[in-house]
Image (tube, grey):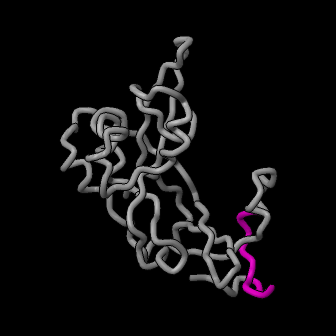
Amino acid sequence: MRWGLKPSWAKDKSMGSRMINARAETVVEKPSFGNALRRRRCLFLADGFYEWQKVGKQRIPMRIVMRSSEPFAFAGLWETWRDPQGDVNPSCTIITTSANDTLSPIHNRMPVILPHDLEAFWLDDSVTDPEVLTSVLTPYDDGAMEAYEVSTLVNSARNDGSEVMERVGYEGKENAYVL
C-alpha cells in the first residue's frame, strides 16, 4: 500500500500525497473518503508513534505509547486506483481526531486508536452506516497512554533501529521529560 489515499476516481496519482490523513469530523462529507469509510476500512498495528512538540523555536520529538506496552491499532481506510496503463495502485490513510489530554500539549490532533473490542467491528464489512462508523472515531483514553522525549535520530528515516524509541531526558536528564 502507498501512503496517501488515492480515490478510484482520481485523475492522477499525485492526489494521494495530499490525503495522508482523514479527519474523523469530516470523513463522511469528503468525497475522497466516504466510499472507503463504508466499504474499505483497515487497521494499522503499532506499538507507538511520534509527534513533535513545539517549544519556542525548538521541535522536540516525542514517542507516544500505551502505559501497558501493548500494541494497538489505528483506524484506517484503503482504496485502489488504476493508473492510465491499467496497473492497480493500492493506497491508504489513517483517520485522525482531536487530541486527548496526553497528546494536547504536544499536538492538537492524534490518530484514532480503536479499543481492542472495537477492532472486529471496524473491519466488519456488513457495517456500512456512516453515522454508526463515525461514532467510534473518538480520542483514545488518555489515562492509558504516555508520551516521552526521544532522540532527534527519529528525524531521519535512515535511522531505523531501536535507538529512535529510547527515552531521553530534557536537557540531557534521563527520562526527565515524560508527560
**Residue 6 in the image: x percent, y percent?**
47, 33
**Toward which corner of the image does residue 58 lie, by quadrant?**
bottom right
**Residue 92 in the image: x percent, y percent?**
49, 38
Q: Can you name the residue that lies furthest to the top here?
A: 85
134 or 178, which lies in front? 134
Report how many numbered discs are placed on residues in the image: 0
Q: Residue at x 44, y 29 (%)?
A: 10
**Residue 119 in the image: x percent, y percent?**
36, 48
Q: Residue at x 56, y 65 (%)?
A: 69
Q: Residue at x 37, y 66 (%)?
A: 139
36 or 48, which lies in front? 36
Say above or below: 1 vs 160.
Answer: above
Q: Can you name the residue that lies furthest to the front here?
A: 11
Queried whether the magenta region covers residue 170, the answer comes back as yes
15 or 143, which lies in front? 15
**Residue 79 in the image: x percent, y percent?**
43, 31
**Is residue 34 shown left or right of residue 52?**
left
Queried whether the magenta region covers residue 132, the answer comes back as no
Magenta residues? 164-174
Specify the quadrant that holds the C terminus.
bottom right
95 or 11, which lies in front? 11
Specify the quadrant that holds the N terminus.
top right
**Is residue 99 shown left or right of residue 52?**
left
Q: Residue at x 26, y 47 (%)?
A: 29
